[in-house]
Image (cartoon, rainbow, N blue to C red):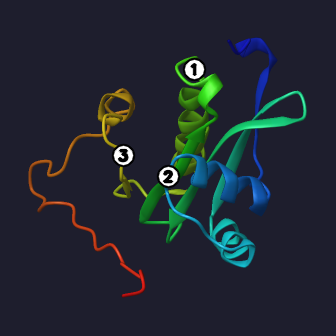
Amino acid sequence: MTDMASVRIVARPPDAETFRQFRAALGWGEMTLAQAERAVGAAHYDVVAMRGEEIIGFGRVTGDGVVNFHLDDVIVKDSCRGQGVGQQIVAALLRWIDEVAIPEAMISLTASAGMEPFYERFGFSISPPEGYGHGMMRLLDNASD
């Protein structure tokens, strides 16, 4: 169990290797270190959840940084889930967005299956809200034939 008093949220990106390892552990695909470095470097804002010197979670904000924001890679280490770490990460990301966004900005995310109720606590709704079309995505399949 994580002692939440010992967890601190730090505004900085995870290192590329940690980013790779956390994503792979969730089955979100493998990537090279160079790809991880590019992905981490593309965020507008990142936070890591630290317990001592150990990263136990992180999240990042991508998008244009003014009108459109996307919460990406909100990940908490398995042994620390369900203890409020993810809530602290998302709250920190949303505070930053509140500081830099125009009033009509849109914040989006793609929740992992079953995580919708977690994000609903922060005011997110399942697409489409009134006046919008369905959220859409296209996944690349780069598997060799």
The residue that label 3 is drawn on is 111
User: In front: mark 2 or mark 3?
Assistant: 2
Residue 19: % across, % down: 69, 56
Task: Please tell me whether residue 133 is drawn above or below residue 14 in the rendered image.
Answer: below
Q: Nearer the viewer, residue 31 or 49?
A: 31
Residue 46: % across, % down: 67, 53
Residue depicted at x 77% and y 13% = 5
Query: In the rendered structure, which amino acid carries the disc numbered 1?
Result: Gly
Residue depicted at x 68% and y 74% = 32
Density class for disc 3 (Cα within 10 Å; few <14, some 14-19, many ≥20) is some
Q: Earlier in the sequence, mark 1 or mark 2?
A: 2
| Left/right of residue 124 with respect to residue 133 in the rendered view | right
Residue 53: % across, % down: 90, 34
The residue that label 1 is drawn on is 84
| Left/right of residue 58 with respect to residue 28 in the rendered view | right
| Left/right of residue 114 with respect to residue 131 in the rendered view | right
- Residues under numbered marks 1 and 2 in contact, where contact means CB atoms less than 8 Å apart: no
Query: In the rendered structure, which amino acid carries the disc numbered 3?
Result: Ala
User: Under tag 3, what secondary structure?
Assistant: loop
Q: Quadrant of residue 137?
A: bottom left
Distance from the alpha carbon under mark 1 to that under mark 2: 22 Å
The residue that label 2 is drawn on is 27
Residue depicted at x 57% and y 42% = 75
Q: Earlier in the sequence, mark 1 or mark 3?
A: 1
Distance from the alpha carbon under mark 2 to that under mark 3: 14 Å
Task: Please tell me whether residue 32 is drawn above or below residue 112 in the rendered image.
Answer: below
Residue 145: % across, % down: 36, 88
* Quadrant of the snapshot with the N terminus: top right
Query: In the rendered structure, which amino acid carries the disc numbered 2?
Result: Gly
Q: Nearer the viewer, residue 36 or 120?
A: 36
